[in-house]
Image: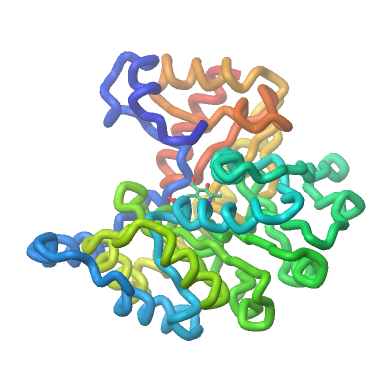
Amino acid sequence: MHGGNLAWAAALAGCSPSAILDFSASINPLGAPRSAIAAIQNSLDLLREYPDPEYAALRSALGKFHQISPEWILPGNGAAELLTWACWDLAKLEVTYLLTPAFSDYFRALKAFGAKIDRCPLKMQGNRSKFKIQNEKLSLQGAGFLLNNPHNPTGRLFTRESILPYLEEFSLVVVDEAFMDFLTPDRQQSLIDAVQNYPNLVILRSLTKFYSLPGLRIGYAIAHPDRLNEWQQRRDPWSVNVLAEIAAIAMLRDTVFQHQTWDWLASAKPLLFSGLEQLPGLQPLPSAANFFLVKTEQSSSEIQRQLLERFRILIRDCLSFAELGDRYFRVAVRSRDENQRLVESLTKIL
Ligand SMILES: Cc1ncc(COP(=O)(O)O)c(C=O)c1O
């Protein structure tokens, strides 16, 4: 269901998990930042203490980063934990419109609380494979809307202006911005600065993809303090561990790493796109994020199997996205050399 299943891939490829070149999880290949690793190493003594249940230092660092007051921010055990709480709120509504294809965890979290889900499929537009929200499907007051921006798996970026009208219509809008950091600040379309005007808006952010620390588990929600206080009172205490808190504070300050990431992506991404585009039967979709959804004339699970068995390369098939099935796969952007290896391996297979 998720990318990055290296144990499964290694069993198929007949090698150790560390020998797999993983394009299936969309994680920044430059990380983890040295600043975060050093902060963790220097703070191991803190493991003897409980975390601050209010996460005051981290909230303050996040507040500074986003220029928003700390009580509007709640750190969590990855965006995934906060998604669960957002879905708890969505489940209180009559129905939740879910933009599909959707990250599989949305279904997990919505179903956990018995939310009624109405799929709102992104429509393919023309032969440039641009996806569009089908507005005519969306109507109800008393309903919620869950979407992500940039959208996983299509890479589509919705403008702020295209989402703002939904805040007037829906009782609750949850925008998962897990991949927003990959865009340079001038291109980001975050709704964080709208939160103070809309108590019905929840933003979810992840620190695990951009900073390449999915094993650490750290994300945060930005929403009205009343909502966040309610979540805080209901959830397990100390859901963010001390090392995650310390690392997050260090990497938010690491502007060098942030700029290195934007520079790497600006040079590696267009090359990977054109490499994929030139292959017979493949059509990568334009993407605002650090991954591409690729349409394929051949079976994507067959391509995945061959890449694994012959080249120890793992891509993400899209079988768990009901709307996409076996005619799409997703690849992360990695270093230029690794991307080249992917394109050359695909050339041999196709
Ligand atoms: C769209 C999206 N949102 C959220 C997450 C979860 O992020 P985290 O690792 O912060 O829990 C993922 C992870 O794959 C994701 O793809």
Q: Nearer the viewer, residue 139 or 276?
A: 139
Q: Residue at x 75, y 70 (%)?
A: 167
Q: Nearer the viewer, residue 175 or 24?
A: 175
Q: Does 146 appear above or below 153?
A: below
Check the picture and name the quadrant holding the C terminus: top right
| Residue 112 appears anywhere in the view | yes
Q: Nearer the viewer, residue 215 or 12?
A: 215
Q: Residue at x 41, y 39 (%)?
A: 338
Rendered image quadrant of residue 160: bottom right
Please give left or right for residue 135 compared with residue 191 in the image: right
Rendered image quadrant of residue 218: bottom left
Q: By what rule are the colours in the image chosen?
A: rainbow
Residue 111 placement (x, y as % from top left): 60, 40
Q: Residue at x 57, y 54 (%)?
A: 88
Q: Residue at x 73, y 66 (%)?
A: 159
Q: How many marks?
A: 0
Please give left or right for residue 252 compared with residue 285 in the image: left
Residue 281 placement (x, y as % from top left): 71, 25
Please give left or right for residue 344 compared with residue 246 in the image: right
Q: Does 54 appear above or below 295?
A: below
Q: Does 144 appear above or below 8?
A: below
Rendered image quadrant of residue 203: bottom right
Q: Does 324 appear above or below 143?
A: above
Residue 277 placement (x, y as % from top left): 67, 37
| Residue 207 appears anywhere in the view | no
Q: Nearer the viewer, residue 81 or 43?
A: 81
Please give left or right for residue 26 compared with residue 52 in the image: right
Residue 82 placement (x, y as % from top left): 48, 57
